[in-house]
Amino acid sequence: MNELTPKQIVRELNQFVVGQKDAKRAVAIALRNRWRRQQVSESMRDEIVPNNIILIGTTGVGKTEIARRLANLANAPFMKVEASKFTEVGYVGRDVESIIRDLIDISVNMVRSEKEIEVIQQAEILAQEKILDMLFPVDRKTERKKSPEAEQRYQRNRQRLKKKLEKGDFEDKVVELDISSDFATQMQVFGPFGMEEIGTNLKDMLSNIMPGQKKRRKMSVKAARKILTDAEAHNLIDQDEVIRLAKESVENNGIVFLDEIDKIAGSNKGVGPDVSREGVQRDLLPIIEGSSVPTKYGIVKTDHILFIAAGAFHISTPSDMIPELQGRFPIRVEMNKLSTNDFIKILTHPKSALIKQYQALLEAESVDLKFEKPAIHAIAQIATEVNNKTENIGARRLHTIMTTLLDDHLYEQTGRKKQNIVITKNIVVEKLAGIASDQDLSRYIL
């Protein structure tokens, strides 16, 4: 993180997201500011709050992708949530604080995975010893009466068997393994509306009162090794340290992506069955401006979590949000609509470009799929044309067009023999031109 300058962050984002220079620049500055904040004196550090961002643009222009790739780049806990879900009547047991609870869960899993990598070698050694004990059990009563010669002979035999085990000679041999069956994990406890934390705490208390039962199962050595390695890694990790680091990561590096923020802008004035949109804004406000949220891992402060909001704002505008919430999103970036040239880049340039994805899919069927340059240009033009004639869904249009174009190949190819398929401009026009000119496009392309 400390090695990435804003220019380098933008360069990394360019590998996955086409265009949107202003949005990339804004998130790159926001990410770098987090590192800068850690360098200032402690008294000043708490005063520096993140500049939250609103990305304004139609669907499919890269808003979510920019936020997700930014989180991956910073190795930060990341949570995507639709703001509109909090307006739904009957959304059982959830409130806006559940965003932070879910975020800390994600962070704990991330830190635990990192710690497991550190101890995995030691865990594998311990698991191997346990498998040896299961394959060749030791009689504890006779073990005490062993002579030194018998002990040496036993150790030589064990070393020989260990080498065979490492070679994989016993992978299919069946062993019996005691697997803990935690009572609490089998029982769901539901709290009342907005009180899911009570349910979580009750479940934790029950797990202490009723310890996990063990169930004996038969399985191969290969399957047992995986279970034993995971169990040993879990035992080697300091769980308190995991929770401490996870909370620290959320509070200083956490990123929350609030999608469909435009759906809660304005006031519905009590019309319709939905919960008040302004009420949802007021519920979100304390979390965004900084508050303490109780979770099963302790209190999590939200003062320095970066919030990136996004919305199309077709009907409403950011100024329709309540003033207090507007003030918490000082950076506003308008996303550009995607052009034909952008579609060509999306199809070819990124590491996981759409054409590369379909080539990989058909390669599994021993098919070598190639696209001529005029064909790629024709696909991009048709995508632009369809977006202009119907609802503009941005780059998502390419998915439906590519599926329609390759429908026959995806259906018929079964990998029985190697094939070379070349998509030319004539094939694209023949397959898609009629669809692009049809007024009832919804019959063919979403």
Image (spheres, rainbow, N blue to C red):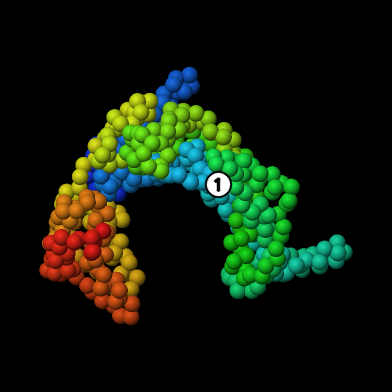
Residue at screen point 41% across, 26% down: 49
Residue 157 quadrant: bottom right
Which quadrant: the C terminus? bottom left
Query: Is 105 placed above or below 267 here?
Result: below
| Residue 310 shows in the view | no
Say left or right for 348 vs 197: left
Callout 1: SS: helix
Say left or right for 341 vs 114: left
Measured as percent of width and height from the top left, residue 323 is found at 35, 25
Which quadrant: the N terminus? top left
Say left or right for 168 vs 22: right
Number of numbered markers:
1
Say left or right for 118 vs 423: right
Residue at screen point 31% across, 69% down: 363
Residue at screen point 41% across, 23% down: 48
Residue at screen point 46% across, 23% down: 46
| Residue 353 shows in the view | yes
Measured as percent of width and height from the top left, residue 183 is found at 68, 54
Measured as percent of width and height from the top left, residue 418 is found at 29, 77
Query: Is 423 placed above or below 230 here?
Result: below
The residue singled out by tag 1 in the image is 112
Measured as percent of width and height from the top left, residue 407 is found at 26, 70
Label 1 crowd (10 A; few <14 / some 14-19 / many >=20): many
Q: Nearer the viewer, residue 188 or 127?
A: 188
Check the image and name the residue furthest to the front. 271
Q: Nearer the viewer, residue 62 or 271?
A: 271
Task: Report the amino acid beneath label 1.
Answer: Arg
